[in-house]
Image (cartoon, rainbow, N blue to C red):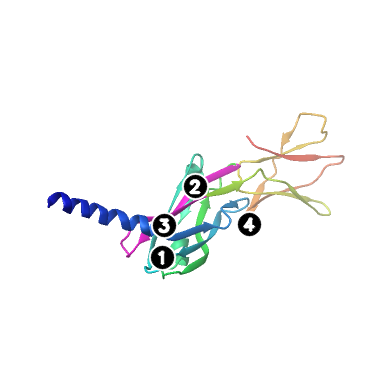
């Protein structure tokens, strides 16, 4: 009798977890977001409770990061609890923002990845893994913009990515690029430098250490 009791207990704990996980659809749209010029990016998804008889409780969202992403990205799980319904009825669907990823201002260019996992189950205490999706935050190299005025010019570039240094040179055939020492201002996710162009041709570029 004791062996049969233990076998039934294990089966009773194991089977529902598999059944619940198989019936939550979780699709990110899109699964890759550009983080250029942003301090946080938001991921939208479609969640579907495909179970025909059971409501699903969505109790938590966990984000894990891989590689260098662990040093620069962080989870904003408040977005999940503020937006996603706590209970999905049978055949219910949710399609909107699911979570946010906070980007450290010092994040260098690169592609960063992680995994989003929805936890829950048949009640408010359940912590089963219902579904998981991988995602990416893309921070390609920054590009320059130039706004010319009557006497001054404003050169700007998005941040993040961070760490770029503005350089100038009067002759593209030379290699003596010099760092621009003008004060850099940050506004709405853009770094901006105001310059007073000297006579002749001057060229500008971004350098990354």
Would you name the residue on which mark 3 appears? 22
Distance between the alpha carbons at the discs numbered 1 and 4? 44 Å
Nearer the camera: disc 1 or disc 2: 1
Q: Are marks 2 and 3 in contact (CB under 8 Å)?
A: no
- Please state the horizontal and vertical placement of residue 8, each as a whole percent of the image: 21, 54
Distance between the alpha carbons at the discs numbered 2 and 4? 26 Å
Determine the secondary structure under disc 2.
strand
Q: Residue placed at 83% from the left, 42% from the top?
A: 198
| Marked residue nearer the N-terminal end (2 or 4) | 2
Q: Are marks 1 and 4 in contact (CB under 8 Å)?
A: no
Q: Residue placed at 48% from the left, 63% from the top?
A: 47
- Please state the horizontal and vertical placement of residue 25, each as a whole percent of the image: 47, 60
| Marked residue nearer the N-terminal end (1 or 4) | 1
Would you name the residue on which mark 1 appears? 51
Q: Which residues are magenta?
A: 109-134
Above or below, 19 relative to 71: below
Q: Residue placed at 63% from the left, 50% from the top?
A: 36
Would you name the residue on which mark 4 appears? 188
Residue 139 appears in view? yes
Distance between the alpha carbons at the discs numbered 3 and 4? 43 Å
6 sits left or right of 63 in the view: left
Above or below, 192 relative to 204: below
Residue 119 appears in view? no
Would you name the residue on which mark 2 appears? 114
| Marked residue nearer the N-terminal end (3 or 4) | 3
């Amino acid at each position: 009798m004791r062996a049969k009791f233990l076998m039934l207990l294990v089966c009773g704990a194991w089977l529902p977890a598999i059944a619940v996980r198989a019936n939550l659809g979780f699709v990110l749209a899109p699964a890759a977001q550009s983080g250029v010029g942003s301090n946080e990016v938001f991921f939208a998804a479609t969640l579907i409770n495909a179970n025909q008889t059971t409501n699903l409780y969505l109790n938590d969202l966990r984000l894990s990061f891989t590689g260098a992403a662990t040093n620069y990205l962080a989870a904003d799980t408040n977005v999940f609890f503020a937006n996603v319904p706590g209970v999905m009825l049978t055949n219910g669907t949710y399609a909107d923002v699911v979570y946010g990823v906070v980007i450290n201002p010092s994040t260098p260019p690169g592609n960063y990845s992680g995994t989003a996992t929805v936890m829950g189950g048949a009640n408010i205490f359940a912590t089963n893994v219902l579904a998981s999706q991988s995602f990416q935050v893309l921070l390609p190299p920054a590009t320059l913009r130039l706004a010319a005025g009557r006497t001054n010019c404003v050169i700007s570039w998005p941040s993040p990515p961070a760490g770029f240094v503005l350089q100038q040179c009067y002759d593209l055939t030379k290699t003596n690029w010099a760092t621009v020492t003008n004060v850099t201002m940050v506004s709405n996710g853009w770094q901006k430098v105001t310059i007073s162009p000297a006579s002749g041709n001057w060229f500008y570029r971004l350098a990354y250490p």
